[in-house]
């Protein structure tokens, strides 16, 4: 984890209040593991408001053309409050303080041993941000990821062309039926889990609490291991403020408060107490 | 010969050491309890030996689970928290955290928490025998725990009692007491703790505050109220430090919204012998090191040979 003042290379408006922000930072880019996040200081100065940095999943690692060396971080920013609005207003060449990469990454080790035959990537809205690096890594390991991507409307399903370019099987859902099938993302996920051989299938989910809870329930029902990418209001990302906790079950099965920043953001869905949403 | 000349021309390094009773700090900058974990978590982001001391997260004898989330909420120039003393417990601290922390040359101060008088005594007695600790900081000022018996920050007599009793079991370690700002007269509490044998006072802890989500008409924190910290509380902290310094003879450590060198200087000029950086650690993990360097620069550029010369130098 490094604390660096880094410059914006590019910022692209994706519509619907979503922006794709590319920052120059070879050092940090080299360290990123799928599922990890960065803490962005949204204001120009360290002591400017808002004070606390905001966590964002690393969507992709920007690479040099040709040699393919890591040179930057690609982050998906959705405007939801004062901090993210400041990030959305950044211009190329401007610099902000960025700390990371941080947090527990997805567990992909079993794949290298040939234990995983298929991976269900389950995304709700900007939850997609945690899954693109993972999709690339799984493909490198010879695992075929299948994308289940849902949102309220077409504009919520940002960056899906990235996954299509990787050649993934995709299932889209929108609540208004503007793209894909009408309804929730868990419908095609359940059909998939019901219809295929589930040995060696794993699920990875990132999105709203209710979506991840539904994905977890299906994973349990069909006996598929499931990891989720958790979100919480975060103070420091360093394990110091103890602010970003969720209720979870420890190794001994006892209930406890685990920090999303250090014990997560990626967590086995079976550890999470899904009946106690953090907000 | 040439080297000698260079040495003569360069400004001498100002003396930054300060004494908090028997504890000598390399410089007056420490990190505040609850904002710096157990110290080692920040070791890759700054030089822990560049500051005068680390006050670690509040420790109780047995682990505490803490309050349900949401626990934090950012406000204008500050934040509310209601963590509820979540900590790993004294035994785990001493076996898993202290050995790594002890390797640094900085002072390790352990903040201790408890619900009842006996809780404080038990953990103080245990830590008193542990090598590698410079002092204990008695936390009788946390606003985020519902207590059964004592209300140590409601009545100066209770503050006196818990300080005197804890001091008795601290046979080896100095005892600092961290005061609450949620009182009418900070001087009463400062004097009560001094009389009870406190070696120093940390002034202040967080101010009780609240925030509401108007759409859901629910409090932003599950605990409803929380402790306000950050630059928003600095003027209040500074005022209380100034008052406390005039009320007692023991050293006062300034805490509350310190984020820059200038903030730290204000507290020192008001009379604080040292300062603690708190919430700033969250968004600027190397803040304390930067402030320590800033104090050296301030002294050097103004020809101040010893930082003690500015402590309590306020002209009114």
Image (tube, helix red, strand yellow):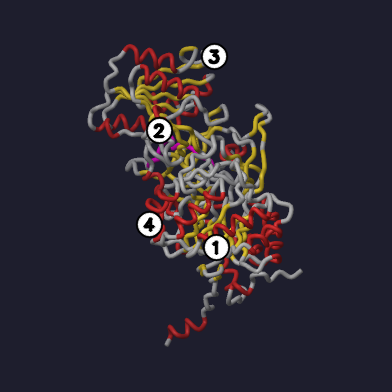
Question: In the rendered structure, does residue A62 fall within the stretch colored magenta?
Answer: yes
Rendering quarter of residue A103: top left
Mark carried by residue B29: 1
Mark-to-mark CA distance, 3 and 2 = 31 Å
Image location of residue B66, percent across then percent down: 52, 40
- Nearer to us: label 1 or label 4: 4
Q: Which residues are magenta?
A: A54-63
Q: Main secondary structure of the magenta part?
A: strand
Above or below for A33 versus A276: below
Badge 3 density bin: few <14, some 14–19, many ≥20, Cα 10 Å: some
Asked if the residues shown at circle 3 and circle 4 are in contact, with their CB atoms under 8 angstroms apart, the answer is no
Image location of residue B225, percent across then percent down: 64, 39
Q: Mark 3 belongs to which subunit?
A: A
Q: Which residue is mark 2?
A: A267
Q: Which residue is mark 4?
A: B99
Q: Which residue is mark 3?
A: A176
From the viewer's perspective, is B232 left or right of A191? Answer: right
Q: Residue at x 46, y 52 (%)?
A: B38
Q: Mark 2 belongs to which subunit?
A: A
Does dot 3 land on a helix, a strand or a loop?
loop
Badge 4 density bin: few <14, some 14–19, many ≥20, Cα 10 Å: few
């Amino acid at each position: 984890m490094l604390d660096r003042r880094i410059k914006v290379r590019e910022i692209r408006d994706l519509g619907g209040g979503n922006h794709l922000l590319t920052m120059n930072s070879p050092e940090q880019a080299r360290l990123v593991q799928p599922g990890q996040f960065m803490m962005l200081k949204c204001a120009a100065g360290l002591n400017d408001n808002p004070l606390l940095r905001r966590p964002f999943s690393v969507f992709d690692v920007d690479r040099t053309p040709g040699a393919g060396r890591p040179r930057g971080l690609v982050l998906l920013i959705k405007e939801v409050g004062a901090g993210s609005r400041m990030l959305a207003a950044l211009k190329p060449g401007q610099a902000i303080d960025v700390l990371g990469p941080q947090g527990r990454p997805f567990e992909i080790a079993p794949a290298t041993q040939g234990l995983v035959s298929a991976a269900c990537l389950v995304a709700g809205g900007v939850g997609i941000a945690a899954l693109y690096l993972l999709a690339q890594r799984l493909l490198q390991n010879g695992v075929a990821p299948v994308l289940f991507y849902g949102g309220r409307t077409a504009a919520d399903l940002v960056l899906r062309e990235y996954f299509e370019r990787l050649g993934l099987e995709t299932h889209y859902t929108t609540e208004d039926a503007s793209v894909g099938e009408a309804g929730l993302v868990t419908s095609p996920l359940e059909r998939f889990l019901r219809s295929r051989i589930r040995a060696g299938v794993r699920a990875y989910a990132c999105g709203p609490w209710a979506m991840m809870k539904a994905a977890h329930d299906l994973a349990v029902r069909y006996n598929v291991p499931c990891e989720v990418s958790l979100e919480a209001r975060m103070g420091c990302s360093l394990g110091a403020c103890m602010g970003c906790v969720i209720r979870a079950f420890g190794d001994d099965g006892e209930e406890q408060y685990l920090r999303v920043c250090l014990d997560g953001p990626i967590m086995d869905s079976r550890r999470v107490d899904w009946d106690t949403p953090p907000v | 010969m040439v080297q000698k000349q260079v040495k003569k021309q360069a400004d001498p390094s100002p003396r930054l050491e300060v004494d908090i009773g028997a504890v000598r700090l390399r410089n007056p900058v420490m990190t505040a309890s609850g904002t710096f974990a157990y110290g080692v978590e920040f070791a890759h982001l700054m030089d822990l030996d560049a500051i005068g001391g680390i006050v670690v997260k509040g420790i109780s004898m047995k682990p505490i689970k803490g309050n349900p989330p949401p626990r934090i909420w950012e406000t204008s120039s500050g934040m509310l928290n209601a963590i509820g003393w979540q900590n790993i417990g004294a035994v785990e601290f001493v076996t898993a955290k202290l050995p790594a922390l002890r390797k640094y040359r900085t002072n390790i101060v352990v903040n201790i928490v408890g619900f009842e008088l006996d809780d404080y005594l038990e953990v103080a007695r245990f830590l008193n025998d542990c090598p590698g600790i410079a002092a204990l900081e008695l936390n009788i000022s946390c606003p985020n725990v519902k207590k059964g018996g004592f209300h140590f920050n409601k009545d100066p007599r209770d503050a006196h009692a818990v300080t005197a009793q804890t001091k008795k079991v601290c046979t080896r370690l100095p005892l600092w007491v961290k005061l609450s700002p949620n009182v009418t007269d900070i001087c009463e509490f400062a004097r009560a703790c001094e009389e009870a044998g406190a070696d120093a006072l940390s002034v202040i802890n967080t101010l009780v505050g609240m925030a509401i989500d108007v759409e859901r008409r629910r409090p932003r924190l599950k605990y409803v109220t929380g402790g306000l910290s950050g630059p928003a509380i600095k003027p209040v902290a500074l005022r209380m430090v100034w008052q406390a310094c005039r009320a007692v003879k023991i050293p006062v450590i300034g805490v509350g919204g310190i984020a820059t060198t200038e903030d730290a200087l204000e507290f020192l000029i008001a009379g604080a012998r040292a300062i603690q950086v708190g919430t700033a650690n969250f968004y600027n993990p190397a803040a304390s090191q930067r402030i320590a360097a800033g104090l050296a620069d301030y002294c050097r550029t103004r020809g101040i040979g010893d930082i003690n010369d500015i402590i309590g130098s306020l002209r009114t």
